[in-house]
Image (cartoon, rainbow, N blue to C red):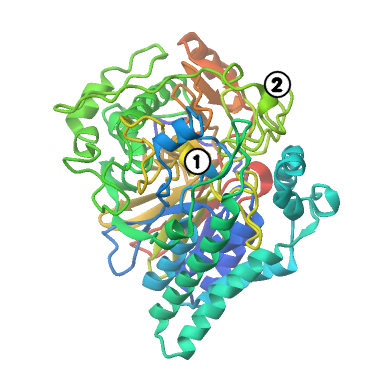
């Protein structure tokens, strides 16, 4: 091994077994998923059950009003990785002209219903259950309904998030205050928190399934009846609510444009994954309507280097990885987007994103030559033959002068905004509280992020899923539903020439980016992490350590993390730090000093501050399964036997 040896004292064991494994960002979701496996369910049944629990127990990081993507492989077709697409598109009324000319905006706000895409998560999970599961809607929803109806001990991070937006809720979002400030105050860690409105919504789906089955419908049709009930219940409530103007991240009140027809018109779907080969492995990601191919691009770049340049724990390796990421993210921001529309199953054709070029060996070789000994402070997208390079959007190194702090309700001192971004809630000090394991922005302030879930079963079914959106602080709670809408449209630009322009019916270019790895046509690893723009960056370091360095998954998760901020953020207010990198202090003084000498602008995040990775594995030769989870924040857990 040419890599720095892993720590001889891992925080947790790499779990091993032959029956089934689950790992997620919350122990209750992991336990719920594992309980499904124990009762004969497949990895897909288990993932659905765990995902709905995540909606309840991590409401500051995801919700039913949000979105999700997954990459999966079935035991029947192991060599064909598929993407479960649960990213809703922009509503019919979400046009650049309306946002610019009527609402007076130059960016889609980070919070409020104008930033809401069509909710996609619930329909996607139910589609997975219908097509690849074996259980009923009633069975998979039982744990989530129980936690929502009877309560669960609330996380400290949920309490900190609510505390950070208390003023916003009280002054501008009364429905959120009613839901999340019982007795007029934020809950305290460990308080038993319920969500009876959400429990009632989920119960309606169970009733719809039961009614359809009683009328003679088969299992698939009964699940579809639950999907139809979801669209009806949610669409009606959402349209009535968003018509009322409410506070947005720009400090003004706007009405949303989402309608019941938008909700009714969305259906989740399956797509073939985009893949590249790396060191004998096949790595599978979403199409370029998500950021997933940026990881594939970085792997292509790094595949041309010797192993000694791929270790993120060394000065040379960390420098090389950061520089490759800058190039991959520049191409993401220049070329990626849902250019073919939400209904297309082709992630890169002649009229779409040119992934055939961007992921080619020849293109990677030309880009690799740009990586020198010094840190780049520029955004350097590549050229695609025969294609005009889209104009770069305006770059902001801060937003304090763009948006007055007083315009941002609930803004803490220093101008950081509450209730905006993905979701930009300052839950710690600067530098961040060591051990939160949450996304860290370019200033070192800790942010919220999202969720992740991985499951593998004894038959060889495997799934990696990243649910997100619909954060309790993203927009006001919708009365009668108990949850908020997501704000994924903030990832679009109010510029018709951009591949990520706001266009009705197009999906915003999501950062949700789960990963599946295959070897010799068999899935061997599913992994992922919350963290917005950092998701693929943290996964890249993990994959290099596992696939090249020989680390076990738990050793790779425990190893020090880093990411670049030298790329425009995908979330409002779209800022960046030229040459910026956020690093865990555990990389070591010598490595950090070397990076500074090379021109990197470092933000020290603390020893255990970056990433919330989890993973499951399978050895096709022996049938041995594995799982590992992130120790940061003492919240993520793996289980299995």
Comparing 73 with 590, the one in front is 73
Counting from the top left corner in percent of width and height, residue 263 is at 45, 59
Residue 119 seen from this side: yes
User: Element under label 1?
Assistant: helix
Q: Which mark is residue 295?
A: none
Counting from the top left corner in percent of width and height, residue 430 is at 69, 24
616 sits left or right of 638 in the view? left
Asked if residue 147 is positioned above or below residue 220 in the image, the reply reads above
Counting from the top left corner in percent of width and height, residue 151 is at 74, 64
93 sits left or right of 208 in the view? left
Q: Are marks 1 and 2 in contact (CB under 8 Å)?
A: no
10 Å crowding of disc 1: few (<14), some (14-19), many (20+): many
Residue 570 seen from this side: no
Name the image quarter holding the N terminus. top left
Asked if residue 280 is positioned above or below residue 574 in the image, the reply reads below
Residue drawn 56% across and 57% down?
Answer: 238
Residue furthest to the front? 102
Comparing 151 with 417, the one in front is 417
10 Å crowding of disc 2: few (<14), some (14-19), many (20+): few
Going from the N terminus, do you reach mark 1 or mark 2 first?
2
Label 1 or label 2, whichever lies nearer to me, is 2
Residue furthest to the left? 386
Asked if residue 39 is positioned above or below residue 615 in the image, the reply reads below
Displayed quadrant of residue 254: top right
Residue drawn 22% across and 36% down?
Answer: 354
Name the image quarter holding the C terminus. bottom right
Counting from the top left corner in percent of width and height, residue 270 is at 33, 60
User: Element under label 2?
Assistant: loop
Report the number of discs: 2
Real-space Cα separation, disc 1 to disc 2, in angstroms: 35 Å
What residue did someone put label 2 on?
A: 414
What residue did someone put label 1 on?
A: 556
């Amino acid at each position: 091994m040419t890599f720095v040896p892993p720590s001889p004292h891992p925080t947790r064991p790499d779990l091993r077994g032959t029956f089934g494994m689950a790992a997620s960002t919350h122990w209750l979701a992991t336990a719920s998923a594992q309980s499904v496996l124990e009762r004969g369910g497949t990895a897909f049944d288990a993932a659905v059950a765990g995902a709905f629990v995540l909606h309840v127990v991590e409401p500051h990081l995801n919700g039913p009003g949000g979105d999700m993507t997954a990459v999966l492989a079935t035991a029947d077709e192991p060599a064909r990785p598929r993407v479960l697409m649960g990213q809703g598109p922009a509503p019919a009324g979400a046009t650049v002209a309306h946002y610019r000319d009527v609402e007076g905006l130059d960016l889609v706000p980070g919070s409020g219903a104008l930033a809401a895409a069509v909710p996609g998560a619930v329909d996607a999970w139910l589609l997975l259950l219908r097509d690849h599961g074996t259980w009923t809607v009633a069975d998979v929803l039982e744990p989530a309904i129980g936690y929502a109806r009877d309560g669960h001990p609330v996380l400290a991070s949920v309490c900190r998030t609510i505390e950070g937006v208390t003023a916003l809720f009280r002054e501008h979002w009364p429905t959120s205050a009613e839901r999340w400030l019982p007795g007029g105050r934020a809950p305290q860690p460990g308080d038993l928190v319920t969500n009876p409105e959400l429990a009632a919504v989920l119960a309606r789906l169970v009733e719809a399934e039961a009614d359809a089955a009683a009328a003679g419908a088969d299992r698939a049709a009964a699940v579809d009846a639950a999907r139809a009930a979801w669209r009806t219940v949610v669409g009606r409530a959402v349209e009535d609510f968003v018509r009322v103007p409410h506070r947005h991240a720009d400090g003004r009140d706007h009405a949303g444009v989402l309608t019941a027809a938008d909700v009714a018109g969305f259906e989740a779907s399956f797509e073939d994954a985009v893949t590249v080969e790396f060191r004998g492995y096949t790595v599978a990601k979403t199409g370029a309507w998500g950021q997933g191919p940026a990881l594939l691009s970085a792997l292509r770049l790094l595949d041309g280097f010797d192993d000694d340049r791929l270790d993120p724990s060394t000065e040379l390796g960390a420098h090389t990885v950061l520089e490759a990421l800058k190039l991959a993210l520049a191409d993401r921001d220049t070329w990626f987007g849902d250019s073919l529309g939400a209904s297309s199953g082709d992630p890169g054709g002649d009229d779409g994103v040119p992934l055939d070029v961007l992921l080619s060996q020849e293109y990677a070789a030309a880009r690799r030559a740009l990586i020198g000994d010094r840190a780049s402070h520029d955004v350097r997208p590549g050229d695609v033959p025969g294609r005009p390079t889209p104009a770069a959007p305006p770059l902001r190194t801060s937003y304090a002068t763009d948006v007055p702090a007083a315009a941002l309700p609930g803004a803490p001192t220093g101008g950081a905004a509450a209730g905006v971004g993905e979701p930009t809630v300052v839950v710690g000090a600067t530098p961040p509280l060591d051990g939160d394991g949450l996304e860290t922005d370019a200033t070192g302030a800790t942010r919220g992020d999202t969720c992740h879930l991985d499951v593998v079963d004894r038959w060889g079914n495997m799934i990696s899923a990243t649910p997100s959106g619909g954060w309790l602080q993203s927009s006001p709670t919708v009365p009668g539903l108990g949850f908020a809408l997501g704000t994924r449209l903030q990832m679009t630009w109010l510029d018709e020439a951009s591949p990520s322009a706001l266009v009705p019916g197009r999906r915003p270019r999501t950062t949700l980016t789960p990963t599946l790895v295959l070897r010799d046509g068999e899935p061997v690893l599913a992994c992922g992490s919350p963290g917005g723009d950092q998701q693929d960056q943290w996964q890249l370091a993990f994959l290099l350590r596992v696939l090249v360095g020989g680390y076990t998954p738990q050793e790779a998760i425990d190893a020090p993390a880093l990411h670049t901020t030298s790329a425009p953020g995908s979330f409002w207010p779209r800022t960046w730090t030229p040459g910026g990198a956020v690093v865990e202090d555990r990389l070591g003084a010598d490595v950090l000093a070397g990076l500074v000498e090379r021109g990197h602008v470092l933000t020290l995040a603390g020893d255990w501050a970056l990433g919330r990775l989890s993973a499951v594995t399978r050895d096709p030769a022996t049938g041995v399964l594995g799982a590992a989870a992130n120790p940061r924040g003492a919240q993520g857990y793996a289980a299995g036997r």
